[in-house]
Image (tube, coloured by chain):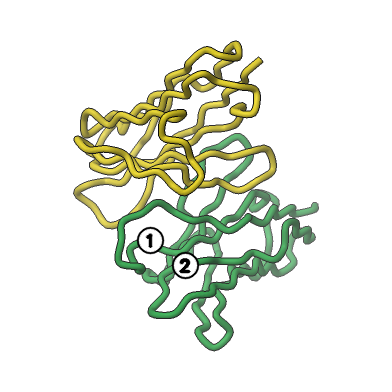
Chain colours: A green, B yellow
Amino acid sequence: AQRVTQPEKLLSVFKGAPVELKCNYSYSGSPELFWYVQYSRQRLQLLLRHISRESIKGFTADLNKGETSFHLKKPFAQEEDSAMYYCAPDPESGGGADGLTFGKGTHLIIQP
Amino acid sequence: GAVVSQHPSWVICKSGTSVKIECRSLDFQATTMFWYRQFPKQSLMLMATSNEGSKATYEQGVEKDKFLINHASLTLSTLTVTSAHPEDSSFYICSARDAGGPYEQYFGPGTRLTVT
């Protein structure tokens, strides 16, 4: 089964500082992964996906097969980045069309 | 962009009654919709996968007789919490997958259920 681990429940950094939200996966094959974000009082939305290699709102995430990680990074945090961030494997990479199995999430707080 | 709505956004019901929550895809067709449950300060947990015109697939530990799912059209799925109890109080979130696009789930705003 595809599983991801987000070891940090809470991460607090100062505005302008670099941010790294950790996500590790524990399954074999060719993993495809997502990062979702949930801002306060807003619905969950897709932030970025591994396969597209995009940079959204200054965030990037690189798949590191050696470390089995898909950490989310941003060089300079902004206050509006404060939110809950969830890592999730792409269900289709497992051959199915199932729902998302989210990590426990990391609450990112950007202090002014 | 793709929009998913849920109704109601908040509902309070008495223990023992049933509550129906609607999930609609407003500008796209969704052959597959998903229902999640989120407890306070916790992650979303998948409850079931709802496929248009067929029976829902429930995750392990989710009672199908307790959480009835109907996906009668390509734009509507409903979740009915039957004989609700206080422990069913939670935030219920649906998502829908665009049948004509790449894999992406679009999430509804959620429904907060409080059972008294």
Q: Quadrant of residue A87?
A: bottom right
Q: Residue at x 35, y 31 (%)?
A: B69
**Which label belongs to residue A91?**
1
Q: Tell me the quarter of the image containing the N terminus of chain B.
A: top left
Dot 1 falls on a residue whose secondary structure is helix
x 26%, y 41%: residue: B51
Instruction: From the top left corner, tell me how far across and down residue B84 is, in percent.
Output: 55, 20
Residue at 48%, 46% (x, y): give it.
B46
Give the chain letter at badge 1.
A
Q: Position of residue A95 (x, y in %)?
A: 30, 66
Residue at position x 19%, y 35% from top?
B53
Q: Which mark is residue A2?
A: 2
Q: Amino acid at mark 1?
A: Pro
Label 1 close to label 2 by CB (< 8 Å): yes
**Residue at mark 1 to residue at mark 2: CA–CA distance:** 8 Å
Frontmost residue, A84 versus A19: A84
